[in-house]
Structure formats: structure tokens, C-alpha cells
């Protein structure tokens, strides 16, 4: 088994690559999440988990700078992403890549054209260099032979892989994945989980992943941030197996053990 790339991290990597401090998300008067705080280390795989409507995707959208927090801060590489401007904000935005739930590939463009797009938009590289880089990214996700196919000509799992390749186009240090296993069969989902693990070990990239798929969580996550819609906050942070086996929180225990009924918070189990 390959060693964890975090084991070789030097002093420069001792600070968290992402920090969420006393975060609150609100739409008008409606508070979706409040008092959420956690750090993400370099080359760590952290899953944002919880039931439907708990704010997983909302939190991720704030983390990538689409919305400013109602309170608190989100730091990327030590800088507040909502306060950065100009060249510095552009550099922060280029420090991460995003794969959306649907893949969001452009249907009229081939896979290689989709991966080339960020390079064409944000670099001054010549066309032959852009093509070479795009092919390399597709090779990393096992799609080099499908480079000239359209998204409609490949499977859902291959579309997710292509979307990850595009998210990696600018060599980001962080990858945000929104429900990567959604809609996939168990075999394809397991293969995608293995790809995430392989990319972490090969590239040392940090993953922040939104999912509620328990098999994937137990396979890929170093730690889970667990959100609860009823309490509108983070209710647990830790390794998924430890949360499954030892969490004192009834909701967390029920979530990781797939229990049908969740006892009231604070009730003995």
C-alpha cells in the first residue's frame, strides 16, 4: 500500500490547507447552518456528510467562494476567500478544482475539449502544450482512449471521471467533489472511490467531498464533518469508523449504522 502523502509533509504544510471558522449560512432570515468550525489538512480526504437538507452542498458552495458567509470565515491557504480580490482572488480560485454532481460537461464538446477549456481560458500555453496536458489528465482517470468522444457517448461513471479530469486541469491543490457517486451502480461507484484514493496518493491532492453514500464514506474518508438539519450545525467530526462505533450522539450513531429511527438528541441508546 502506498504511504500517506501527508507523512512526508514538511513544516510549510503544518497549517491547515482549508479552515472553516464559526461559519454561518443564511438566506435572509432563515439560518441553514451555524457555528460550524473545522480544519482540513493537506492531502486529507474529508467528507461532508449528513441527511438530506442538512446543508452539505450549501457549505461546499460557500467554501468555493460562490456565496459569502452570513458570519464567520472560510480560509483557503490561510486567506479569506471572500475578502481576497483581484490577482490574489484569482490565484485562490485556481488553487482548487470543482466537480459538480451532474458532471457539468459541455455536451457539444469532446472530453479532451472539456478538459482543455480551463487551460485555454486561464493560461497562455500554446495549443500543443494544452492538448498534452489535457491528455495527461484524462490518462490519470483512465479515459485517454475516450478523449475524442462526446459526453453523451460515454457512461455516467466515465462522465464523472472526465469531470474530475477537467477539475484537475490547472493542477489545483484541492478538489471539491459534489456527490461523485450519485446515480452510479455499486461497481462503478467502488471504482470511482479507488480513483479518488489513487489520486490522493499519486498527486498529494486534498479532497473535500459531499456525499451521504456510506460505502464510499467508509472507503475514502479520513474524517467526516457530520451536519444535522434539525440542529442546523455540525454535530460530529472524526474518522467514520470511530463515529459509527463510538459516537455518543444519537443522530450520528443512527446515520452511520443505518438505523431507521433516530431517538431525540440526548436520549440514551
Image: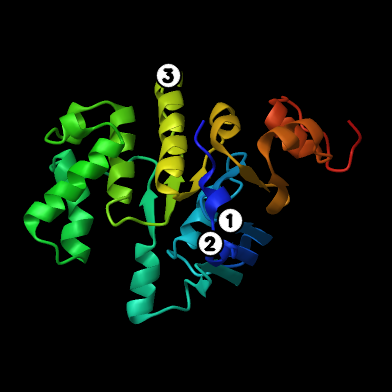
Residue position marked by numbered label 2 in the rendering:
17
Q: Picture coordinates of residue 199 (x, y %)?
A: 41, 41
Q: Residue at x 14, y 32 (%)?
A: 149
How crowded pointer 1 is (Cα within 10 Å; few <14, some 14-19, many 20+) is rated as: some
Q: Picture coordinates of residue 119 (x, y %)?
A: 20, 58
Q: Secondary structure at mark 2?
A: loop
Residue position marked by numbered label 1 in the rendering:
40
How crowded pointer 2 is (Cα within 10 Å; few <14, some 14-19, many 20+) is rated as: many
Give how far apart the Cα atoms at labels 1 and 2 are.
Answer: 6 Å
Residue position marked by numbered label 3 in the rendering:
187
Q: Quadrant of residue 183?
A: top left
Q: Which mark is residue 165?
A: none
Q: Residue at x 60, y 31 (%)?
A: 218
Q: Please name which of the two marks, 1 or 3, marks the residue nearer to the observer.
A: 1
Rendered-image quadrant of the C terminus:
top right
Give how far apart the Cα atoms at labels 3 and 2 are.
Answer: 32 Å
Q: Is residue 180 visible?
A: no
Q: Quadrant of residue 247?
A: top right
Q: Picture coordinates of residue 29 (x, y %)?
A: 61, 67
Q: Please name which of the two marks, 3 or 2, marks the residue nearer to the observer.
A: 2
CB atoms at circles 1 and 2 under 8 Å apart? Answer: yes
User: Is residue 56 shown left or right of residue 106?
Assistant: right
Of callouts 3 and 2, which one flags the residue occurring earlier in the amino acid sequence?
Answer: 2
Amino acid at each position: 500500500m502506498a504511504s500517506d502523502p501527508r507523512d512526508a509533509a514538511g513544516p510549510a504544510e503544518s497549517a491547515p490547507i482549508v479552515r472553516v471558522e464559526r461559519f454561518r449560512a443564511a438566506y435572509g432570515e432563515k439560518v441553514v447552518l451555524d457555528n460550524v468550525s473545522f480544519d482540513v489538512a493537506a492531502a486529507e480526504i474529508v467528507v461532508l456528510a449528513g441527511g438530506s437538507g442538512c446543508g452539505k452542498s450549501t457549505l461546499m458552495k460557500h467554501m468555493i467562494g460562490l456565496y459569502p458567509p452570513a458570519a464567520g470565515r472560510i480560509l483557503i491557504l490561510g486567506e479569506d476567500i471572500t475578502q481576497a480580490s483581484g490577482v490574489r482572488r484569482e490565484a485562490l480560485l485556481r488553487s482548487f478544482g470543482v466537480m459538480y454532481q451532474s458532471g457539468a460537461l459541455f455536451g457539444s464538446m469532446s472530453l479532451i475539449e472539456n478538459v482543455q477549456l480551463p487551460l485555454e481560458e486561464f493560461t497562455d500555453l500554446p495549443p500543443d502544450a494544452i492538448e498534452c496536458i489535457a491528455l495527461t489528465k484524462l490518462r490519470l482517470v483512465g479515459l485517454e482512449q475516450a478523449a475524442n468522444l462526446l459526453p453523451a457517448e460515454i457512461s455516467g461513471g466515465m462522465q464523472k471521471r472526465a469531470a474530475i479530469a477537467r477539475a484537475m486541469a490547472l493542477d489545483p491543490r484541492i478538489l471539491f467533489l459534489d456527490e461523485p457517486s450519485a446515480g452510479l451502480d455499486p461497481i462503478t461507484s467502488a471504482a470511482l472511490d479507488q480513483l479518488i484514493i489513487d489520486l490522493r496518493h499519486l498527486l498529494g491532492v486534498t479532497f473535500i467531498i459531499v456525499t451521504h453514500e456510506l460505502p464510499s464514506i467508509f472507503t475514502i474518508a479520513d474524517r467526516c464533518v457530520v451536519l444535522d438539519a434539525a440542529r442546523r450545525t455540525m454535530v460530529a467530526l472524526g474518522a467514520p469508523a470511530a463515529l459509527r462505533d463510538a459516537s455518543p450522539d444519537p443522530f450520528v450513531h443512527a446515520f452511520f449504522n443505518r438505523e431507521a429511527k433516530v431517538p431525540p438528541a440526548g436520549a440514551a441508546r
